[in-house]
Amino acid sequence: MSAEPARRETFATRLGLLATMIGVAVGLGNVWRFPYMVGRFGGAAFVLLYLVFAVLIGVPALMAEWTLGRETRRGPVGAFQRGGFPGGRVAGWVLFAGVTAATGYYSNAIGWVLFHALGELARGVAGIVSGGGGGPTGTVAPGAQGLGTGSLIRGVAILPPDSGFSRSAFLLQVIMTGGVVSGAVLVLLKGVRRGIEGISRFFTPLLFVSLTVLIIRSLTLPGALEGVHWYILKFRPQDLTAAVAMAALGQLVFSLALGGTFMVVYGSYLNESDRLGSNALLTVAGDTAAGLLAGLAIFPAVFALGREPGSGPGLIFTTLPGVFAAIPAGWIFGLLFFTSLGGVAFLSAVAAFEVLIAGLTDNTSLDRRQATFLMAATVFLLALPPMVNMKVFLPWDLTFGSGLQSAGTLVAVLTVGWAMDRGAVLRQMAGVAQGPVQRGLHLWIRWVIPAAIFLVGGWWFATEALPVLLG
């Protein structure tokens, strides 16, 4: 294994490390994507499988990706090759291309969130100007949806239509996505410690505070308990289908930012003294808690407001504004929530860009500044197709957000479990304290996680995809 490059930047503090890792993992994955995936794939059955996968696959897979990154001190393009995976350089570039495409649609979704934050602010300003205090004072406004700002800003206007084309939605997305990409450039040019780690320490705690406030209000809405029952108590064994299992596994990979990309790069910035096991446990716990809290904030409100839990990617944007409308001065809480969510989601976008920048700086003659601007322009162009409508956005999300990331996780654990030197892997995972637990963990990464990914994927393909292909 070649020596660590002398100028490889690392995290400054453990607090900053955990805030960054949890912030990257949470992102939109567990606050935006987790609830709508729960709604589309079985409710409580999906949640149960997700929790099982988080413990049995999430923690060891995260340790494996950090091990790969810290041992090689490279992003995915160089890490798989240095780790000894056959065709590792090709696999790295394939994942690089997938992250590039995924970052485009993900930046769109962040733009939706930030637009809604602006909408809540506009609602508050309009209420203050009109003397109404910025919103209702205790009851859900009839038909409340979007941002509740009337003609000033319509909350759902930025979302892509289900089909067809909306010029106004497209232009709004272009503006907001351009802002997200530009903001990422400013942070990335500052590097890991001053840029990424700095904003992580602010936005990650803020999101948990706003989720707590939202849960309290959501649970006090009339009819909210029906949503709680559906979310965590209404379990039926027949709901444990291949599609639900595949969706839960894909969501875990997405929400933990696995996939042989994000966490490999961030693993390359870990100090040698950072303990992978405890940090992985805390990261998975924080990420999972965010998803469960988001569901607890959203599904009681979905049922209280008479909405459809399986309504898809627009779920939080058509439900939560109704909750904010039921809170005195609710626009303040809406602004807090959408701002903090946008901030944490922005951390994941920054991580995605970091994968791309590391891929170029590690493997080409481009410096960090040149790579940053090149990838910003590329991502913005690839963000345009998913803006058209949900018939483009949803397949884009499932392909690059679940499918390719699950494949990347498989490549990462195969590299660590089979291609890398066993002694190097154990040293990275446990330091000098190498005992039966660490050796068992290595065997788990080597055999069980790849088998689980193959079994779930094969089950899904045989029962869901193959019948469609055969007509």
Image (spheres, rainbow, N blue to C red):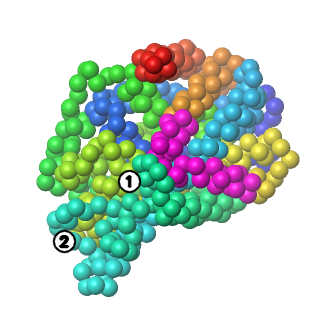
Segment tinted magenta in the rendering: 372-401
Give the SS element for disc 2: loop
Label number found at residue 208: 1
Confirm whether the magenta stretch covers residue 420: no
State the CA–CA distance, disc 1 to disc 2.
Answer: 25 Å
The residue shown at (42%, 30%) is: 247
- Image quadrant in which the N terminus is located: top right
Main SS category, magenta section: helix
Residue 88 falls left or right of residue 114:
right
Label number found at residue 137: 2
- Image quadrant in which the C terminus is located: top left
Q: Position of residue 246 (x, y in %)?
A: 44, 26
The residue shown at (66%, 48%) is: 354
Q: Position of residue 375 (x, y in %)?
A: 71, 51
* Nearer to the camera, 289 or 297: 297
Relative to 418, does residue 361 appear above or below in the rendering? below
Q: Nearer the viewer, mark 1 or mark 2?
A: 2
Q: Position of residue 137 (x, y in %)?
A: 19, 71
Relative to 198, does residue 411 appear above or below in the rendering? above
Question: For residue 100, what is the image quadrant?
Answer: top right
Question: For residue 333, what is the image quadrant?
Answer: bottom left
Which of the marked residues, 1 or 2, is nearer the chain's N terminus?
2
Mark 1: give few (<14), some (14-19) or many (20+) Cα within 10 Å. some
Under mark 1, the amino acid is Phe
